[in-house]
Image (cartoon, rainbow, N blue to C red):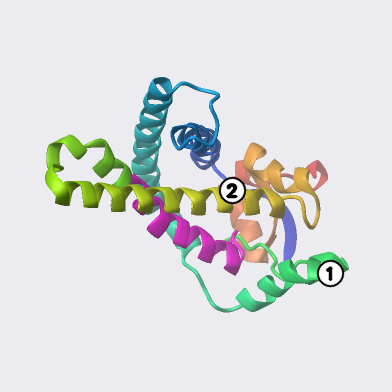
Amino acid sequence: MAKRSVKVFPFFERFWHWAQVLLILTLLFSGLGLNGAHGLIPFGPAVMLHTVAALTLLVLWIFATFWLFTTGTWKQFIPRIEGMLQVGRYYAFGVFKGEEHPYKKLFWRKHNPLQAATYFAIKWFVFPAIWSTGLLYLTYDLWGGGTEGTFWLTAIANIHILAAYVVAAFVLVHVYLLTVGHGFRSHVRPMVTGYDEIDLTPEQEAYLETNEPSRIRPRDAG
């Protein structure tokens, strides 16, 4: 294995990531305002902001889902048990003792087992819960009415808020984990430049240098 600087995050994945960050923060801010957590924005504009950001994010997710499956990138998010306990132990204890991260990034596997499992749960369970309950809430006038409608609206709203708190917790933990190990900048830089340090087999290294030279930086380029 040779450690090389390889473009593992293409432009769309980086655009998707940062656009998603902006929209999720907007939704959390406006959602907290709608629930009375702050009064920094009036109720009417907060509803409009929340709705526009939610629909924009939904469109982004549709394009991202199409991209994940057409490029085969969805395989990166399939969780695996192997190595998960070691990574969990590192984040719970090892990082405070200065230990090295037990997972080494590979060309075909850029997410460690714990990351993959977390992203899998967020993308395939929490996010669908968010947008499905949000759409039902938004279209209440089309299906609601009567006592049953009020009951289901309350249930939908509570599920939506619960899922939103899960997303908020994920954001906080995600930002915290960016500060451990080799430092915040080294963790964020790959999602800005697209390049990350990963282990390549001689065959993978030769293939990239011959067929996709733009994806692998020269050794003296760092």
Q: Secondary structure at mark 2?
A: helix
Residue 81 lies in what quarter of the image?
bottom right
Q: Secondary structure at mark 1?
A: loop
* Residue named by callout 1: 99
C-alpha gap between disc 1 and disc 2: 24 Å
Query: Eyeballing the image, is 44 above or below 174?
Result: above
Q: Is residue 124 left or right of residue 7?
A: left
Query: Eyeballing the image, is 127 above or below 18?
Result: below
Q: Nearer the viewer, residue 187 or 156?
A: 156
Magenta region: 109-131
Q: Is residue 201 left or right of residue 149?
A: right
Residue 92 lies in what quarter of the image?
bottom right
Q: Mark 1, mark 2: which one is toward the viewer?
A: 2
Amino acid type, label 2: Val
Q: Quadrant of the N terminus?
A: bottom right
Where in the figure is residue 59, as x and y percent of width and height? 34, 36
> Which mark, residue 171?
2
Q: Magenta stretch mostly in which secondary structure?
A: helix
Q: Quadrant of the C terminus?
A: top right
